[in-house]
Image: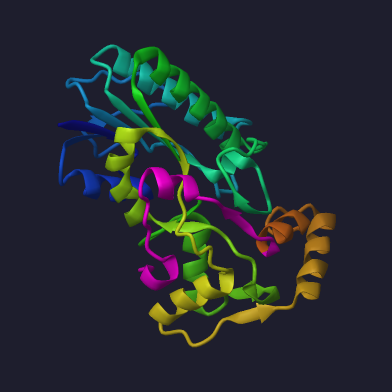
Amino acid sequence: MNALLTGNNGFFGKYIYNSFIKTHNIYTLSRSKSSYNVDLSKQIPHFNEPYDIVIHCAGKAHDLSKKTIKKNLIYKINVNGLKNLLSGLEKKIIPSKFVFISSVSVYGLLSGINVSESNDLLAKDEYGLSKIEGEKIVKEWCKDNHVKCLILRLPLLIGQNPPGNLGAMIKSIKKGYYFNINGGKARKSMVLADDVSEIILKASEIGGTFNLTDGNHPDFNQLGYSIAKQLNKKYILNMPLFIAQLLSKIGDCMGLNLFNSFKLNKIVSDLTFDDSKARKTLDWKPNSVIDNIKI
């Protein structure tokens, strides 16, 4: 069977590729080093083969550079890229299954406990809004074309050489300047990239929309010490909450995005997601992040 994977050069795309290469003839689409070297944000791809399953993992999550970017760039890249992909598929043979990699960002929450798939989608940031719109487009397209649709809403993905905040956390622990705030007691949902990649094929046969987590929702302190142990670091520093609050107020006054009250509230608040639907429907049995993390 043929499978098409977009975003194969990305952090999670590499995990999906390694999982699907075992069972499928896998074709890849990215801006470079792929079967199809295409910039989906600007081009409609022309495919040479029909695909049984398409996994759309490409997209832009954030831009950490200091360069000014056009307003709504992330939204435009993600939504236009999806539309161009679907247009390209329509010119060949429509796949029987389509997998859309979404995010718990669609819920738009800074705090919450066991947030389920039935919760309202309240995102207001570009990335979250792009995923909401993407889910809507995929559902409608799959319905119109009689395609089995799978949407996976993922929290923090744990794996080797991660990007973003987790990558920065690992780097700072390695260099000895990472610190928890308020003891790192805030619990966050996370999941192993390996576990998610291995459930995709099975889940695609069933379809639906699912949160996926490891079910344990570790706190920052647990995650930090698990990483530190692998790096042979003996301890992690801690910043008392009142000092962090003072610094965040300074950040507010100076207009700093690096650290302000918004960022602090996000760091110290619990935010966990309910994956009981996946456990019941998909027989989802993930491994513990803390016991199995490998950096």
Task: Identify the residue at horizontal 80%, vertical 67% (top origin).
Answer: 245
Task: Identify the residue at horizontal 35%, vertical 14% (top origin).
Answer: 145
Task: Identify the residue at horizontal 46%, vertical 18% (top origin).
Answer: 140
Q: In this view, does 66 lie above or below 192?
A: above
Q: Is residue 170 visible?
A: yes
- Dividing the picture into quadrants, the one containing residue 144 is top left
Question: In the displayed image of the protein, which residue is found farthest to the front?
Answer: 280
Colour scheme shown:
rainbow
Measured from the top left, where is residue 191 in percent x and y?
44, 57
Task: Identify the residue at horizontal 22%, vertical 49% (top origin).
Answer: 18
For this rendering, which residue is in front, 63 or 91?
Answer: 91
Q: In this view, does 138 lie above or below 14?
A: above
Measured from the top left, where is residue 128 in percent x and y?
58, 38
The magenta-colored residue range is: 268-295
Measured from the top left, where is residue 189 in percent x and y?
53, 57
For this rendering, which residue is in front, 27 or 172?
Answer: 27
Q: Is residue 11 left or right of residue 174?
A: left
- Tell me, yes or no, whether the highlighted magenta stretch contains residue 280: yes
Q: In this view, does 50 lie to the left or right of 60?
A: left
- Tell me, yes or no, whether the highlighted magenta stretch contains residue 47: no
Measured from the top left, where is residue 160 in percent x and y?
35, 62
Q: In this view, does 106 lie to the left or right of 5?
A: right
For this rendering, which residue is in front, 109 or 87?
Answer: 109
Q: In this view, does 189 lie above or below 74?
A: below
> Tag count in the figure?
0
Task: Name the image quarter holding the C terminus.
Answer: bottom left
Q: Is residue 30 visible?
A: no
- Dividing the picture into quadrants, the one containing residue 59 is top left
Task: Name the image quarter holding the N terminus.
Answer: top left
